[in-house]
Image: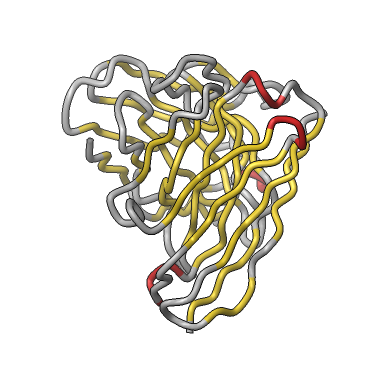
């Protein structure tokens, strides 16, 4: 399953709403997770099963989507949210990641 | 809390072998699936292999037949035996937990280690 993530790069101002898209090449139900990664650090889990926030993740992060179209939304973005974001499909093997989105602060 | 600590990375010549380890703590290791995921320099994440709690295993096409994932539940340790290494295997290798308790089923990665660097040159 191919995941097409967009945009590859975006720049936002603190307080903005940010949407990152992940489109699957076929129906994968809600089997999508989202991960945040900062330079030199391992990924951390943000969203599981398309919509469930991982423990300890602030409520400004939310996920939506089912089937082939998925979105990670950051409401009222904060400067500490500058990072790379990756989607993952775990509907079928091999598991595949999106190409990533680099989110920068303006 | 869940802790995963990888070790065993280093510089190795093409064609040689290397074994990575991942020491797990803070959870019932034998209940869950485990993954290896890698990240080449400046690139995205690539799934490498998964082992279920019953020791059944699955691999990415890029490593099948060269890499073997294994687990020792008595030692709470995950392994990745890497043979016939190639320059394109150069990456940071992460171990990660999967909350799946069913063979052949994945819920994705929920907890990640810090990673260990493998350089094939």
Q: Residue at x 62, y 23 (%)?
A: A54
Q: Residue at x 39, y 26 (%)?
A: A32
The colour scheme used to paint the residues is: secondary structure
Task: Tell how many labels.
Answer: 0
Residue A44 appears in the picture as rendered: yes
Q: Is residue B112 left or right of residue A29?
A: right
* Observer-nearest of B75 and B113: B75
Q: Is residue A86 above or below residue B115?
A: above
Q: Residue at x 52, y 22 (%)?
A: B54
Kindly indicate the quadrant of the structure image that contains residue B9: bottom right
Question: Which residue is outermost to the left?
Answer: A26
Q: Quadrant of the C terminus of chain A?
A: bottom right
Q: Is residue B14 above or below residue B82?
A: below
Q: Quadrant of the N terminus of chain A?
A: top left
Residue A73 appears in the picture as rendered: no
Q: Is residue B52 left or right of residue A96?
A: right
* Observer-nearest of B35 and A64: B35
* Residue A3, horizontal then vertical, whole percent: 27, 39
* Residue B80, horizontal then vertical, whole percent: 55, 52
* Residue B117, horizontal then vertical, whole percent: 61, 67
Kindly indicate the quadrant of the structure image that contains residue A89: top left
* Observer-nearest of B46 and B33: B33
Q: Residue at x 33, y 47 (%)?
A: B60
* Residue A75, horizontal then vertical, whole percent: 55, 28
């Amino acid at each position: 399953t191919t995941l097409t993530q967009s945009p590859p790069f975006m720049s936002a101002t603190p307080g903005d709403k940010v949407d990152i898209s992940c489109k699957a090449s076929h129906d994968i139900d809600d089997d999508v997770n989202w991960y945040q990664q900062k330079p030199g650090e391992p990924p951390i889990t943000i969203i599981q099963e398309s919509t469930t926030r991982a423990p300890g993740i602030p409520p400004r992060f939310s996920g939506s989507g089912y089937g082939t179209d998925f979105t990670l939304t950051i409401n009222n973005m904060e400067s500490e949210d500058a990072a790379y974001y990756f989607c993952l499909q775990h509907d079928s093997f091999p598991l595949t990641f999106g190409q990533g989105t680099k989110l920068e602060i303006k | 809390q869940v802790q995963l600590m990888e070790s065993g990375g280093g510089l190795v010549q093409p064609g040689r072998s290397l074994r990575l380890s991942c020491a797990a703590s803070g959870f019932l290791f034998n209940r869950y699936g485990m993954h290896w995921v890698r990240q080449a320099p400046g690139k995205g994440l690539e799934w490498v292999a998964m082992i279920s709690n019953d020791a059944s295993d699955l691999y990415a096409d890029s490593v099948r037949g060269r890499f073997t994932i294994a687990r020792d539940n008595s030692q709470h340790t995950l392994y990745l035996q890497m043979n016939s290494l190639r320059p394109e295997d150069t990456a940071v290798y992460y171990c990660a937990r999967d909350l799946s308790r069913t063979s052949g089923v994945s819920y994705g990665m929920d907890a990640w280690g810090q990673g260990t660097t493998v350089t094939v040159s």
